[in-house]
Image (cartoon, rainbow, N blue to C red):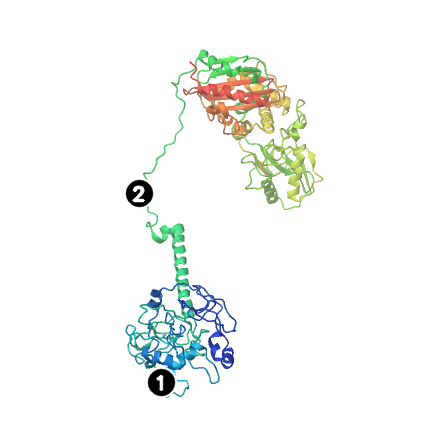
Amino acid sequence: MSDPQAPTGETGDHGEVDSSADTAAESSTSPGEHDATGTSEEQDPFGWPAEDPESTPGKADESGAEGPDPEWPEHDEAPVESTQRLEAVGRASETHAEGTGAGESGPDDPDSDPPTVQLAAVPPSVGEEPPSGGTAPPDERSAVESSEAAAPGSSGATRPADPADFGMPPGGASRGAPRLLGVAGARAVPGPARAVGDGGDGAAADTSAVSSGTDSSAETASTGEGDAGGGVGREPDTGTSRGDPPEVAGPGGDSGSGGGSAGEPGGKRARGRMGRKSVITAVSLVGVIVLGAAAVLGGTVWFGDVLSPRADAPAPVRLNPSVSGLDSSARMPTKQGLSRALEEVVSDPALNDLGGTVLDSRTGKVLWSRDADRSMVPASTNKLLTSCAALLAVDHDFRFSTKVVRGQDPGSVVLVGGGDPTLSALPEGRSSVYPDAARLDELVRKIRSSTSGEISSVKVDVSRYSGPTLAAEWERGDVANGYIAPVRPVMLDGGREDPTDIHSPRSEHPALDAARELASRLGAPTESVSTTTMRGSTSTLAEVRSPPLRDLVRKLLRDSDNVLAEAVARQVAVTTGHEPSFSGAVRAVRSVLERNGFDLSGVDLVDGSGLSDTDRLTPRLLGELLRTASAPADGPSGRSARLRPVLTAVPIAGASGSLAGRYDGPASEARGWVRAKTGTLTGANALAGTVVTADGRLLSFAFLSNGSQPNEARPALDRVAAKLRSCGCR
């Protein structure tokens, strides 16, 4: 803690200075300027006044300039008495006599009888008198004169101060409470007291003050060592800080700290204490951070369950998932009830020309119908006919095959199309729009392993299909729009430019593009790729296969894939011995369905996908196909059993395929309960599928809307199906 009376701008510790500079300062400094050197760079932390409050106002500082009279704060005796022990400055009687006998002002002089006694903190060492020829300041002279009067016969030379000069016990004697020396009524010599040392290293002498008998209390203040007002007790070589507070001496004259030397600055000790506090604070903060991190990141590892107590684990939940059939005793809607329920929704103007039918799947009973035998544009619901014909005529495990055989010329190979439009150009690990599709890279690997020669040319055989590659009724722009590609027995990713985008534009020459890609990966020139037809037998270098038919049917119905639908229709033609063309596929589908008992009256088709707006079929046929697929099984090889994949292949309302973004708003109650194939063309919208009623009865339905716009008709059709779900209809 700094001396409360230390001058402003000076602190209790000095920075290190060059020893040569100190020596020069000692040799050149006047006696009155010993303490004006070595000002500290640090400010007093307590901001005390810059000058001694007991010094005479207006007294010149070291530079000789007059300073303004400072305003001094009131002093509390308690802090001074708690940090300093005071001794009397001198014997009262001798001081008084010497003060008057030395030519100083008498008692009547106000300057000789101030209201308070000026005190000085005892420095750690005894000061020196000014060198010969020097003139001490007035206060300092008075103190020196008093000292000479008290010690007659003194030679005037510098000598160590004797504690007896101040009525103090000899050095090393134990110190008790401050003693008041002198007689009552005596006054101390004005001016600062002379500082003495007690012989202990780094210890500060104790001082006390004696006031006149008329003053019951004395205002005390400790002056900094070597103040401009006097302070002859400073030794120039000690380096003692001005602001160092005196410390209570211990036994034997040692300072209270017990280890400080006379030359050690008190400010350095203060900085040491502050440094230790900073270190302790930093260590504590680091500890808190470490403990916090341990609690958050690894509390259970370091501290077990102390930081994260856990209750007993709950009993394990046992799930018994099962798939159960519909309740056979669920009540069937009545015709009257269903008619009343559907009357409003089927009359929506958005549906325009509507034809439809609703059947009970278990019994096959028609519960509701409107123009069910009228031929209407089916749009993509035509894919239901193609899929049912394929499931009835083709083995469900059938897979399309794509081969590479040796060409007639040395170093040539031929890519033979086997009808698979799902062969993917993507590398292993990347998924195209067709799940589990065969890879072109697999063909390349097999070719490399089958031949060690250089491949000089690649050709493609597309003779599996005949006739035009695009239906006459299709719009040519549908290729660029991504709806269709020219129907070829081999292509990559359905002819898409982007294998991962279901709506990607398609290629105009999908078979040649596939052959060029194969040539590129085999290191053969791509510009010589052309079509050819293989005759006779030849060796097969490589072969890959598509997913099974049941998976292809699921894909074409869920995503309404036109290219895949045409490929499946041609496979029906190949299987049944019909020409693998548009017309041959249509005839094959028709013959298969009629052979399985379905009435195709009013049906007129030109393709297998429903992309043509000239296709015609009846709502009744769609209803019969779906009712047969959902009817109780009639044996493992019966129609219902073979058509079962249709039920799980069609989209789920609000969840998958072309129904994923539908059944919001008023139709949301049917989400997950309706499964149906969609159909959309300009001027034609359709929905055909199954629904489970609120009573648990399974119904089959088909609704065809012609002359309607998709944005209005599709939500209206969803509301019709949702009404079937919500009503008991009895």
Give the secondary structure at mark 2. loop
Q: Residue furthest front?
A: 108
* Camera-nearest residue between 469 and 242: 242
The kind of residue on which mark 1 rests is Ala
Residue beneath the point at 47% across and 80% down: 31
Quadrant housing residue 436: top right
Mark 1 is surrounded, within 10 Å at the Cα level, by few (under 14), some (14 to 19) or many (20 or more) other residues, namely: few
* Lower position in the chain sequence, tag 1 or tag 2: 1
Where residue 151 is drawn, which disc sits there? 1
Residue beneath the point at 41% across and 55% down: 289
Q: Measured from the top left, where is residue 672 in percent x and y? A: 46, 26
Tell me if residue 389 can be seen: no
The kind of residue on which mark 2 rests is Asp
Q: Quadrant of the N terminus?
A: bottom left
* Camera-nearest residue between 727 and 442: 727
Give the secondary structure at mark 1. loop
Q: Which residue has dot 2 on it?
A: 312
